[in-house]
Image: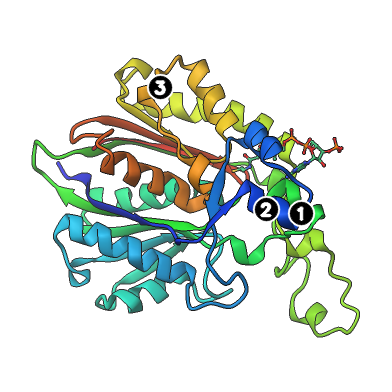
Amino acid sequence: MLKSYIKGIGHFVPENIVTNDDLAQVMNTNDEWITERTGIKERRHRRDRVHSDETTATYAFHAAKKALSMAKMSAQDLDYIVFATLSPDYFFPGSGVVLQDLLGCKTIGALDVRNQCSGFIYAMSVANAFIKSGTYKNILVVGAEIHSFGLDFSDEGRGVSVIFGDGAGAVILSATEMEDHGDILAVNMHSEGKYAEELVVKFPGTKYGWSDRLLTENHGLTSKEIYPYMNGNFVFKHAVTRFPETMMEALDKAGKKVEDLDMFIPHQANLRIAQFVQQKFSLPDEKIFNNIQKYGNTTAASIVIALSEAIEQDKIKRGDLVLLSAFGSGFTWGSVLFHY
Ligand code: COA
């Protein structure tokens, strides 16, 4: 039976550290508020927020090189790319094709996934299906974001802009029949589109217009349309309900219990959400990994950066049972349960 296992993994974050005190210099916020509500102490931003050679695909490139190196593979060995991001290099085409070119892959398929904070879960689920069906053998699965270029750093945007950060992570998911290799045991994906506008960037899009409004002298665009809008309390309440549901669904499907888990990595949305889930399932500290304190919420990149760091720090070993779960804009949510 074909199994899909993580052959290589890597992550990349820009060097530029932005602390809560740095943000307090440009907007009416403070370290205490941000730490208390979110757990975040600092995040990474690309050096030049507006124009830069650093794009989402270049961050993904650095992460992918590390994953390839760990897997002892070259870009030529890849059969397919799945690229999760909400902050692509262009409105179109997607960043997957940019990465295909940067890496010098063959003319393999490159799929972009638009599922925001759940993007990496969706991307892994798609890659897993391609591998289990025998369609592809080695798939590069990426989660990458550059948020800092598109956040509102005025007082009006403070409820959102303090949360998000930049970064990328990449996994090589490979087909195997070896008994001592890991496997993805269960995946699930969910959505509830009636809440699309509770966490949203409205512009540009076919609902709120694009070139017609940009070219109009008094285009009437509001900051709520061009910057991310988040109904924070509403998102929080849904997250703490959906996280336990999707986690239990994955465990039940694989016939596993919470106690069987060696590590749980939640999407790094907010430390309070992660702590709520940890308490609900009575998970000991060594069975949950959080790094939101250092990187903020990097959306599609958050889980894969955390997974990569946990492996780097030897907190996850080959054979361990690991659960990844996410909730976010859409709303979307889901989980991936696997043996590493
Ligand atoms: N610094 C200081 N004060 C701030 C602030 C900031 N960065 N952002 C908002 N405030 C103020 C508000 O203006 C408000 O002031 P008021 O009471 O005078 O009106 C007060 O803090 C409380 O704002 P509120 O939005 O109710 O805070 P909250 O307790 O809901 O916390 C979040 C806000 C965003 C931290 C919280 O709702 C949250 O984490 N939600 C989930 C977000 C999430 O996970 N998003 C990602 C999904 S994947």
> Quadrant where the C terminus lies?
top left
Q: How crowded is mark 1: few (under 14 residues within 10 Å), some or many (20 or more)?
A: some
Which image quarter: residue 313?
A: top left
Ligand 1 within 8 A of label 2's CB?
Answer: yes
Task: Depth check: give the residue in front, 215 or 23.
Answer: 23
Looking at the rendered structure, the kind of residue marked 3 is: Asp
Which residue position is annotated with label 3? 285
Task: Depth check: give the residue in front, 317 or 46.
Answer: 46
Q: Residue at x 22, y 45 (%)?
A: 5
Looking at the rendered structure, the kind of residue marked 1 is: Met
Q: Which residue is drawn at 82% across and 78% down?
A: 213
Ligand 1 within 8 A of label 1's CB?
Answer: yes
The mark found on residue 167 in the picture is none
The tag earlier along the polypeptide, 2 or 3, is 2
Which residue position is annotated with label 2? 23
Which is more foreground, mark 1 or mark 3?
Answer: 1
Q: In this view, does 69 lie above or below 179?
A: below
Q: What element carries label 3?
A: helix
Looking at the rendered structure, the kind of residue marked 2 is: Leu
Q: How crowded is mark 2: few (under 14 residues within 10 Å), some or many (20 or more)?
A: some
Q: Position of residue 44 (x, y in %)?
A: 52, 56
The tag earlier along the polypeptide, 1 or 3, is 1
> Quadrant where the N terminus lies?
top left
Which image quarter: residue 228?
A: bottom right
Q: Is residue 288 left or right of residue 138?
A: right
Q: Residue at x 46, y 57 (%)?
A: 167
The mark found on residue 27 in the picture is 1
State how far apart marks 1 and 3 are (Cα). 34 Å
Query: Is residue 83 at all visible to an observer of this figure?
Result: yes
